[in-house]
Image (spheres, coloured by chain):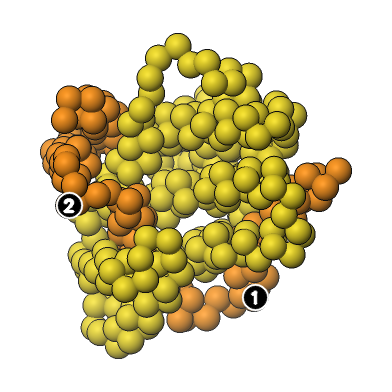
Chain colours: A yellow, B orange
Amino acid sequence: MKKENAKQMIIKQAFYRSLPVMAGYLVLGTGFGILLRSAGYGTFWAFAMSLFIYAGSMQYVGVGMIAGGASVLTMAVTTLMVNARHLFYSISMVDRYKDAGKYKPYLIFALTDETYSLLCDGTVPEGSDPDLYRFLVSAFNHSYWVAGSVLGSLLGAVLPFSTAGIEFSMTALFIASYTEQWITANDHIPALTGLIGTFVSLWIFGPERFLIPAMLLITFVLTVLRGRTDARKAEVTR
Amino acid sequence: MKAAVLVAVMSAVTILLRALPFLVFRKKTPAYIVYLGKVLPPAIIGMLVIYCLKDVQWMKAPFGLPELVAGVCVAALQIWRRNAVTSILTGTVIYMLLIRVL
């Protein structure tokens, strides 16, 4: 009985943690489902793509490429380019997910931008199994994405009301995460590096191709700054 | 059939990218990677904030005002209440109102 309560508790906590992503994923997923249907691929495809690919921006790009009959090589290279940022998410989670056991494969598979932003600060509710908690947060997010896609596919283009602007929930999620980690962190250099490095890269390379240069620049600057005393402290206190 | 192959390719490449660092750093995680794991998250969140705002037209009406006002509200609410759900929902509603009136 006591164990049952603990399990319900952790499910509740994981669900609450995933709430900020829910609105965004339902809406973006719905948008994807609508787009895919208009390209001639129905509910089964929306379900399968969201279940097995689970990478928002790539799925949007992929719709046009599937409809246009892109080659396998073009698709592979494009996916590599659009999703290369996931390498960096995984690199920063290598240590945290190392001993996640049976949950590890799924945790790695489900590491999207949004899930990463929820789990990257490493906090878990007191007394709960961290791996189970992270698994549940990841699975909740995944279910919103799949549900949104299927919903969009079923609805087609007939939505009862205008949802224009609801995509800002993703921006808001990242701004809230950024603010929260700023409040809790002692060392603000990494956060500033991310902001400034990306801005510089956007300025130089333009909105279409700044993301990878930004990541390389950020990683380079943070590597150079590794000798700082604060950074040394961070390594020791881990 | 072709579509199924393309979906499989997208899925496989995405999984490969997500799994690669875990395969490479299988045994003892190098100190450098531990360090990156510590400093990359706040930096990448900052990057994602800019990424979301990359297509805002700052020089044309409404000069990115909806994004700016709603974004500041999200940050302010987060500082005040420390509750992500409240910050995000309020900020999004403010944004949806602003793009309709501005």
Label 1 marks a residue whose chain is: B
- The quarter of the picture where the N terminus of chain A appears is top right
Q: Is residue B33 above or below residue A147?
A: below
Quadrant of the image containing the C terminus of chain A: bottom left
- Label 1 secondary element: helix
Which residue is most to the top? A160
Q: Quadrant of residue A196?
A: bottom left
Q: Say which residue appears at 63% left-offset and 43% top-offset.
A: A63
Q: Which residue is mark 1?
A: B24
Residue A126, numbered circle: none
Task: Tell me residue A181's x, y (percent).
Answer: 27, 54
Using the image as rendered, state which of residue A151 and residue B41 is in the foreground.
A151
Q: Which residue is mark 2?
A: B59
In primary-sequence order, the first of circles 1 and 2 is: 1
Badge 2 element: loop
Across and down, in percent, residue A121 comes to 38, 55
Residue occupying the far right of the picture = B1
* CA distance for labels 1 and 2: 45 Å
Side of A122 relative to B4 (left or right)? left
Residue type pointed to by label 1: Val
At 57% from the left edge and 28% from the top edge, which residue is drawn?
Answer: A34
Look at label 2 and name its amino acid. Answer: Met
